[in-house]
Image (tube, coloured by chain):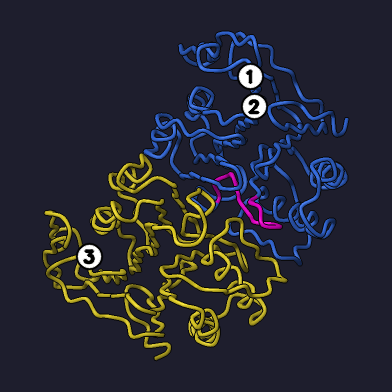
Chain colours: A yellow, B blue
């Protein structure tokens, strides 16, 4: 299994604190890591088949305050697919002139959908196969970039099929919104005014968000396990899809 | 205009020396940089709208010896498209379960081909538009990954159309080969046994490749301007397409 981290904000925000929290769990999840940062439509993707504890790329990510409104990160413990660069999440494809980023925690047994469209896996994971199928089906369902609500409705129709094959906690973003689907383990919280202090659950590191933010800032964070010890993380129900836009939960898209 | 650097080798090789040479030219080409490293089918892509002289990402690339058999790098001086992450080269798309990487030096005037397929630009450069068109036409011409020779033949048919619109020096790779097309300024060389010393043209830095290589190593390097002062760089003719496989020029694909 793996661990996921997602962030959606209404103002470009760095995730150094949360990524540090995630990376402390890389001792167990040592088979690679990846993190994708949207800056408007542009995307930075850092992947490395090394552990996030040892990787010079992860070291740079922990130190360089890249500000982004949508972030998806992943640390990998291989289940399907060997340890290799092409099997590191997040995966990226382009559709309708937008990049789409996907990361998965879980394990899909015998999910081999027919891939007859323009999206093929490069690596050998069940996760990338599921992502390619999702992109193919989204491309069939809409002629151009639909609204976020329309995308959520289509995803709500599509997600049960792969989910029936196993554990399917996932994060998806096109830079406009962050979609998060809970299967077995996924939590979220929103940080907003008045911002307080938070302390990492796994490491003696705390941050005073009040000193780093303005009263208008809104940040939603999604993670496999609560990253902080003193904030109120809310669990996803099994099969629950949530959408975050501008740091706000954009209504429950499915239950 | 911009500057290109490409590397194709028969054994995973780092490009720290050549990238350092390229980055010294970033004072003039300050509108972003990017570098893509293939590791087998996997890909690392680093892009930053900052200059390669200032970017912490470039700093990491100069220090972290990422070994790759196909590398494409680019430093940008914006002509079309504003300075933004989504306009940084190289660009990446997936086709037939392989990543394809493209970088361009030049300026295409009024090249607005019909993009009716699965590849759309995310940014606003003429370069990404030309890349999407090339991918669309490759996808139409072949049902699956063709041989390198077949790809070279198809590219030879396709490249004159965009080239008619302006300057079109380009590098393209799918991890199996490096294609390089000369328009106005492009040079290449091969390093092989007996390896000697080389000194950067723009900076007082030299390297003894003999100490870093084995007698079987073959490395081909392509660049906008010769990167070293004491090696024999060969110019591309206008409209010349060359293909490099395993560090060897794989026959002249067109003249």
Rendered location of residue A209, percent (x, y): 16, 62
| Cα separation between marks 3 and 2 | 46 Å
| Cα separation between marks 1 and 3 | 50 Å
Q: Is residue B152 above or below residue A145?
A: above
Q: Is residue B50 left or right of residue B169?
A: left
Label 2 Cα crowd, 10 Å radius (few <14 / some 14-19 / many 20+)? many
Q: Quadrant of residue A250?
A: bottom left
Label 2: which secondary element: strand
What's the residue at 87%, 33% (across, down)? B254
What's the residue at 79%, 30% (across, down)? B250
What's the residue at 13%, 72% (across, down)? A194
Q: Is residue A145 above or below residue A201?
A: below
Rendered location of residue A37, percent (x, y): 41, 57
| Residue that label 1 marks | B226
Label 3 Cα crowd, 10 Å radius (few <14 / some 14-19 / many 20+)? many
Q: Nearer the viewer, mark 3 or mark 2?
A: 3
| Residue that label 2 marks | B223
Cβ atoms at labels 1 and 2 below 8 Å apart: yes
Label 1: which secondary element: loop
What's the residue at 64%, 73% (across, down)? A136
Label 1 Cα crowd, 10 Å radius (few <14 / some 14-19 / many 20+)? many
Queried whether the magenta region covers residue B97, the answer comes back as: yes
Q: Quadrant of residue B197?
A: top right
Where does the N terminus of chain B fall, quadrant-wise?
A: top right
Confirm whether circles 1 and 3 share one chain: no
Q: Is residue B5 left or right of residue A127?
A: right
Pick whichever, A235 or A125, lies toward us. Answer: A125
| Residue that label 3 marks | A227
Q: Is residue B249 above or below residue A138?
A: above
| Cα separation between marks 1 and 2 | 6 Å
What range of the chain is rendered magenta? B87-99
């Amino acid at each position: 299994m793996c661990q996921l981290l997602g962030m959606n904000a209404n103002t470009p925000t760095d995730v150094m604190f949360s990524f540090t929290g995630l990376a402390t769990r890389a001792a167990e999840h040592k088979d690679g890591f990846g993190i994708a940062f949207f800056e408007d439509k542009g995307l930075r993707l850092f992947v490395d088949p090394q552990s996030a504890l040892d990787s010079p790329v992860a070291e740079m990510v922990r130190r360089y305050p890249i500000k982004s409104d949508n972030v998806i990160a992943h640390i990998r413990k291989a289940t399907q697919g060997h340890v290799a660069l092409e099997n590191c999440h997040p995966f990226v494809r382009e559709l309708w002139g937008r990049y789409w980023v996907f990361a998965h925690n879980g394990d899909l047994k015998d999910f081999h959908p027919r891939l007859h469209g323009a999206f093929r896996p490069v690596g050998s994971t069940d996760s990338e196969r599921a992502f390619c199928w999702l992109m193919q089906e989204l491309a069939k369902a809409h002629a151009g970039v639909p609204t976020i609500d329309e995308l959520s409705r289509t995803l709500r129709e599509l997600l049960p099929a792969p989910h029936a094959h196993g554990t399917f906690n996932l994060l998806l973003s096109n830079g406009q919104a962050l979609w998060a689907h809970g299967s077995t383990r996924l939590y979220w919280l929103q940080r907003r005014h008045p911002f307080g202090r938070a302390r990492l659950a796994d490491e003696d590191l705390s941050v005073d968000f009040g000193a780093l933010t303005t009263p208008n800032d809104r940040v939603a964070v999604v993670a496999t396990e609560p990253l902080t010890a003193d904030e109120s993380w809310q669990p996803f129900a099994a099969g629950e899809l949530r959408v975050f836009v501008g740091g706000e939960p954009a209504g429950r898209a499915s239950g």
